Image (spheres, helix red, strand yellow):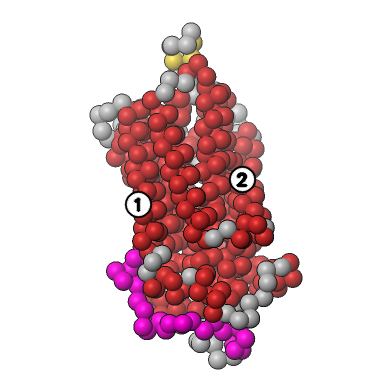
Amino acid sequence: MEDLIVEHQTDSEPNSDSSRSRSTTIDRPNTIDSVSDRFHLVKLLFFMIGLSQLLPFNFLTTSEDFWMYKFRSLSNDTVIIIEDKNELQKFFSSYLTIVCCSPYLLIYFVCLTKWFQRISFDLKNGLGFISEIVIFVLITASVFINTDRNQLLYLITLLSMVFIISCWGNIIQSNFTGQASLFPASYMRSMVNGQAISGLFASLAKIASLLSDRSLQFSVFCFFVLADLVLLITLFLYIYSRREPFYRLYSFENVSSSSSNNEPMNFELFIKIFKKLWPFCLTLLMTFWITISLFPALFVLIIPENESDEIVPEKLILPIFCFLIFNLGDFLGRFIGSYMLLTKDSKITLLLISIFRIIFIPIFIYCNAQPRHHLVLFSSEIYFVIFNFIFALLNGYLVLNVFVNAPLTIPEQHRQIAGYLLVSFLGFGLTLGSLTSPLIVDIL
């Protein structure tokens, strides 16, 4: 792994390519040898950014049992009707996925506007962190509010708050994706691995909360408080790390001030960069389109073949079979990618693998997802666990390879634009996936 890191770091340094002209080289006021990342704080910051910016989505989707309780069918306002899932329960994960993923393209175009670019990098991130924390604290407080008589109103309010969190989260993620592309490749890898750990962390925290003897509401409350604390810690780490000389050495401000030949951001430049990045961009689009089409909207509907089976307690079946297995596979895919990283010339291979994953759509449709009107081919949950793991493994492997290799094909002063371009196609994939997921659930 160290050899890989050294190789990519060498590729990312301004003087590593002898064929690069002086006009595309950024002369930094300090050398890499004279400034180091003390205690790896900056690398930890990128890891925490990756972890924290997906926490709201991961924590909200992992709490499927709580949302099923919140939107349960009622008789005489008090008696719970234990039947098949109602429409709110069946499509809630699809609604949640849409509001979490749809803002990506909107925020991407906002980020390109001139008035938005005039706002300082620190101000945008600061407002984003504070807004995320405040709104998620409100969602946490709503856990104990009785919403039985106003389920639809609560649903609209909840989705509106999640949409705002997603908008700010997308801004922060776009900013730091562009920022990470200016650092050595191991820093982008750290951010991508943080995204994988986010889902794994949420799954393990959910399982731990369910193993307690507390009520469902109290367990979910503690679960959400943990997410609040992680967001707060990330904010403080960002405030402290941005003062570090190593962070300033690679920051946008330093690159902008030390580069005398930056081209203005315009349509022609975007096309020029896209011609180099298009296989990576399409790989991200296909990867997230297929992933979000199925996870979590369809996955949360999977039930065991024999519900009386006591090998796994009923309350842990969904957190383990759906969320833990997926997030473990996603993490291992990124971890394996760190040791078996494809070269930056393997972009067509990555694209073909992402297209191949389409086969998982019919496979999961014919797993035991309920309620449904069509036959089941893979009734045992063992099939689902195996398919889920392979599906997630490929997802993690593709994502890490794209985000590490793509910036290396672009001159350093254009990597911020390359980061925005990658995020835009990631967002396009998420948007398409979130809009496709209700259709897949509906055809069951």
Q: Amino acid at mark 1?
A: Ile
Q: Residue furthest left?
A: 213
Q: Amino acid at mark 2?
A: Ser
Quarter of the picture containing the C terminus is top right
Can the viewer see residue 114 in this picture?
yes
Height in image: 56 above or below 1?
above
Can the viewer see residue 275 in this picture?
no
Kindly identify the residue that appears in the image at 50 percent across and 79 percent down: 12
Q: Position of residue 210 (x, y in %)?
A: 31, 34
Q: Residue furthest top?
A: 76
Q: Position of residue 369 (x, y in %)?
A: 52, 35
Cα distance in 3D space between marks 1 and 2:
27 Å
Which residue is at the front of the view, 299 or 204?
204
User: Which type of secondary structure does the marked residue at label 2 adopt?
Assistant: loop
Q: Which residues are magenta?
A: 20-43
Height in image: 62 above or below 108?
above
Kindly identify the residue that appears in the image at 47 percent across and 73 percent down: 250
Which residue is at the front of the view, 312 or 112?
112
Q: Which residue is mark 1?
A: 233
Q: Say the numbered circle drawn on residue 102.
A: 2
Q: Position of residue 212 (x, y in %)?
A: 26, 33
Q: Position of residue 392 (x, y in %)?
A: 47, 53
